Image (cartoon, rainbow, N blue to C red):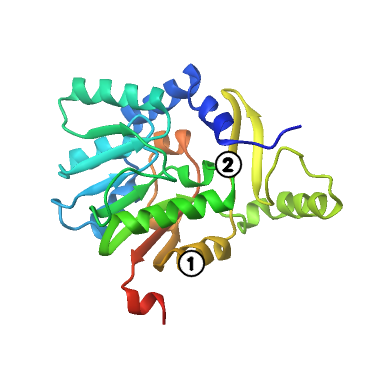
Amino acid sequence: MTKVSSSQVLNYFSKPLVLQHYQEATEKVGLWNSEKIIFSKTFSDKNSKILEIGCGTGRISFGLWEMGYKNLTATDFSNHMIKRSKRINKNSKTLISFQVEDARSLTFADSTFDGAIFGFNGLMQIPGRENRYQVMREVFRLLKLGSHFVFTTHDRNMPKWKKFWALERKKWMRGKQNPELLEFGDRFEDTSRGKLYIHVPAVEEIRSDLKAAGFSVEKDILRSKISEESTMAKKYSDECRFWIAKKRDYISRHS
């Protein structure tokens, strides 16, 4: 049995049912209450040049546009997602730049953006820790000094999942884990829309990779601690942890 790959993940995000799910979240949910709070505090200047990675059908970018942010670039690995985003963009008469990009190797110049966002746990849907770390390095490269990177993840340390992960760890120790998985923390399971991959990290894992990439962690906080979400937002998403990381200067990165 082969290991989960980027091509399998891309195939999932090309399925009509998945595309429809993301479009519904864009049109019916928009920004979560927690996202509005985090984004407005982190990116206080509405003229900031912001990059959204893994935009899906544009839920976050369209929400930011409505909040008054007009200098937005949104990217996704899936051409099918970007096609839907552009269609919504045209119908909504917004001026967001949507384009297909591989988050591991983005085509923008160094120090281009004032902020970056990777929402909806999208970073964790990239198979392989080294690949996720490479995305962090790319974001670091693209951000201006002192700028912020905001993203979300699930949290393997949550009490709700303690028993599940304890059993998974025993499987890994015995070599009995799902052979498709790359590393402990991976999940690759059947859903009503197809087989979904996601990595569920421990807090220490994310902190370590951000530091290695050159970032300082300004804040990490569970969504539920920020704001109560709408019923519709809860229908399309669940609890996650927000990360707010800052691009440090050369001296602090090597101190």
Q: Position of residue 106 (x, y in %)?
A: 36, 44
- Determine if residue 223 is in view: no
**Distance CA(mark 1)–CA(mark 2):** 22 Å
Quadrant of the image for the C terminus?
A: bottom left
Residue positioned 55% across, 62% down in the render? 203
Residue drawn where x is 69% and y is 37% of the image: 3
The N terminus lies in which quarter of the figure? top right
Q: Quadrant of residue 60?
A: top left
- What residue did someone put label 2 on? 198
Given this view, does label 1 or label 2 mark the residue nearer the observer?
Answer: 1
Image location (x, y in percent) of residue 173: 82, 55
Callout count: 2
Q: Decide which of 213, 241 is in the foreground and name it.
A: 213
Residue 58: give its label: none
Amino acid type, label 1: Ala
Residue 157, percent from left and from top: 62, 59
Give residue 28's position: percent from left, percent from top.
34, 28
Element type at mark 1: helix
Looking at numbered disc 2 in the image, what kind of residue is underneath it? Answer: Ile
Observer able to see residue 247:
yes
Position of 192 compared to 145: left or right?
right
Q: Quadrant of residue 59?
A: top left
